[in-house]
Image (cartoon, grey):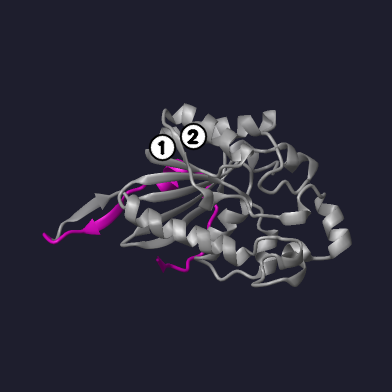
Amino acid sequence: MKRAYVDVTEFRNLKENCNVPEKKTSKDGKIHAQMLPLVIFMRHGQAESNVNRILAGRHMESHLTEQGRQQVVDSAKQLVKTIAIEKVYASPVVRTVETAQIVCQILGTDYVIDERLYETEMGRLVGMNYEDITTKYGDVLTRFYSDYDPILESFGVESFASVKHRITNLLDDLLQKHEDSNVLMVTHLDPIKAALATLLDLSQETLHRWNIRNASFTILKHESKIYSISGVNIMMMYRYPIE
C-alpha cells in the first residue's frame, strides 16, 4: 500500500469536505470532476465501559448507553445525507455490532463482520479501571504505542504493531475490493489510531493523547492506490463544545 504523509485537519462539515469532486485532466485534455473513494472508520458509540472507565477489551460485555445510541443515530443520519456507502464492515465485539446494527438500519443495508477490525486483545488488563492501571503500572498505556513493551507482553496484551499489521492488511484489501466505492468500517479506538499511524509519523505520546471520539468518523480517501487523510473526529456540531 502506498502512503501519503499529510497534515490532519478536523473537518467540521462532512458534506463540504468529503463529498467534493476532485478535478482530473483526462486524455482529451479536458478537466472532469471525479469522486474519490472513501474509507470511513467509525468508532462505536459510547459504551458502558467508557462511562465507567473500564478496559473492556474484546470479550467483556459492554453495551451501548442511551447516549451512545443517540450518538450513532446522529452520525448515521448525517452520513446517509452525504455519502453513498457500498459496504459496511464491523468488529465482532458487542458494542461495535450494536453500533453497526443502528447504522445499517438507517442506511438500509447489512454489515459484514471482519475480525481485522477487532478491539486490541488486552489480556489480563481486561476489567481494570484506567486510573488503577496507571497507579499500578505507570505509563504502560502510553508504552502500548511503542514497538515493544515486556510488561504488556507478560499480561498477554496484543502489541500495537500487531494492530497496525492487521489494519494495513485490511486497507490493502479494500484497495482491491472497493477501488471505486465508499466503505464504512465500524471499529474501536486503537484500530483507528493504527490506520492513522500507517500514514503519519506519530510518537507514542501523541498516539496515547489523541482521543478518537465515540461515534466519530475518521476518513481516508484513496487515489491511484495512495491513501490520504481527509478528516479525523468528525461529529455533529453540537458535540464539539462539550467533548
Magenta region, residue range? 1-28
Which residue position is annotated with label 2?
Answer: 78
The amino acid type, in three-letter code, at marker 2 is Gln
Residue 4 painted magenta: yes
Q: Quadrant of residue 153?
A: bottom right
The amino acid type, in three-letter code, at marker 1 is Thr
Provide residue 212's location: percent of width, then percent of height.
63, 51
Prevalent SS, magenta region:
loop
Q: Which residue: 72% across, 55% down?
A: 123
Q: How many marks?
A: 2
Q: Is residue 167 visible?
A: yes
Q: Quadrant of residue 93?
A: top right
Q: Is residue 36 visible?
A: no
The image's mark for residue 82 is: 1
Disc 2 crowd, CA 10 A, few/some/many (<14, 14-19, 20+): some
Disc 1 crowd, CA 10 A, few/some/many (<14, 14-19, 20+): few
Provide residue 41's location: percent of width, then percent of height.
51, 48
Provide residue 33's location: percent of width, then percent of height.
25, 50
Q: Which residue: 43% across, 67% down?
A: 4
Going by the picture, which residue comes out furthest to the right? 135
Secondary structure of the residue carrying tag 1 is helix
Q: Which residue: 51% across, 33% down?
A: 103
Provide residue 99's location: percent of width, then percent of height.
57, 35
Going by the picture, which residue comes out furthest to the left? 28
Circles 2 and 1: CB distance less than 8 Å?
yes
Q: Quadrant of the C terminus?
A: top right
Residue 54 painted magenta: no
